[in-house]
């Protein structure tokens, strides 16, 4: 039943390509914020081409990404995932083990308001440690 409703949702939404287009339109301002904000290390490609809207990052001055995640949640009502995100070998490879990173992910239900909440929140947290 869940799989059937998922397929119906994709069909109602105009298909996978339309959903991906929506996600990537929202992703651009968030990606630019993460790339341009002083103190943020972004662990992803230098382009939005051929990718999903998932961004892993750390903020200089914070020892544990969980602190950033807690602040985003409690102080700014921004949902994120922190830590090794079920990918410890990736974090060993990119040098973020054992603490990991903060991950912001956009999906089909994400809105412009979500992005507009995350951008100033991340900038403010980074500015606190500068």
Image: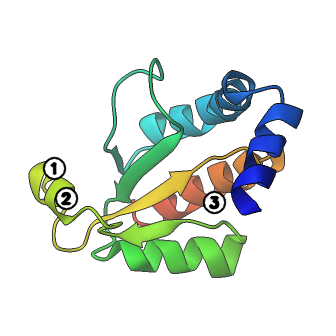
Q: Which residue is mark 2?
A: 91
Mark 3–mark 2 Cα distance, whole angstroms, equals 24 Å
Mark 3–mark 1 Cα distance, whole angstroms, equals 25 Å
Pointer 1: residues within 10 angstroms few (<14), some, or many (20+)? few
Query: Is residue 56 shown left or right of residue 43?
Result: right
What secondary structure is marked by label 1? helix
Provide residue 56's location: percent of width, then percent of height: 39, 51
Q: Is residue 90 above or below residue 74?
A: above
Q: Quadrant of the N terminus?
A: bottom right
Give the quarter of the image for residue 26.
Answer: top right
Provide residue 77's location: percent of width, then percent of height: 72, 72
Q: Which residue is mark 1?
A: 94
Residue toward you, 12 or 107: 12
For the point 46% across and 17% down, the residue is 49
Pointer 3: residues within 10 angstroms few (<14), some, or many (20+)? some
What secondary structure is marked by label 2? helix
Residue toward you, 24 or 119: 24
Mark identifier at residue 121: 3
Mark 1–mark 2 Cα distance, whole angstroms, equals 5 Å
Provide residue 90's location: percent of width, then percent of height: 19, 54
Provide residue 42's location: percent of width, then percent of height: 35, 44
Q: Is residue 10 above or below residue 67?
A: above
């Amino acid at each position: 039943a869940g799989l059937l409703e998922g397929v119906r949702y994709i069909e109602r939404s105009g298909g996978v390509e339309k959903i991906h287009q929506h996600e990537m339109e929202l992703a651009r301002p968030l990606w630019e914020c993460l790339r341009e904000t002083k103190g943020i290390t972004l662990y992803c490609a230098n382009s939005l081409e051929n990718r999903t809207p998932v961004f892993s990052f750390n903020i200089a001055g914070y020892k544990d990404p969980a602190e950033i995640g807690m602040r985003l949640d409690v102080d700014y009502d921004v949902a994120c995932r922190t830590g090794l995100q079920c990918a410890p070998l990736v974090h060993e490879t990119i040098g973020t083990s054992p603490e990991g990173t903060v991950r912001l992910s956009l999906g089909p239900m994400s809105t412009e308001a979500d992005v507009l909440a995350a951008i100033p929140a991340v900038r403010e947290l980074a500015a606190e440690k500068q």
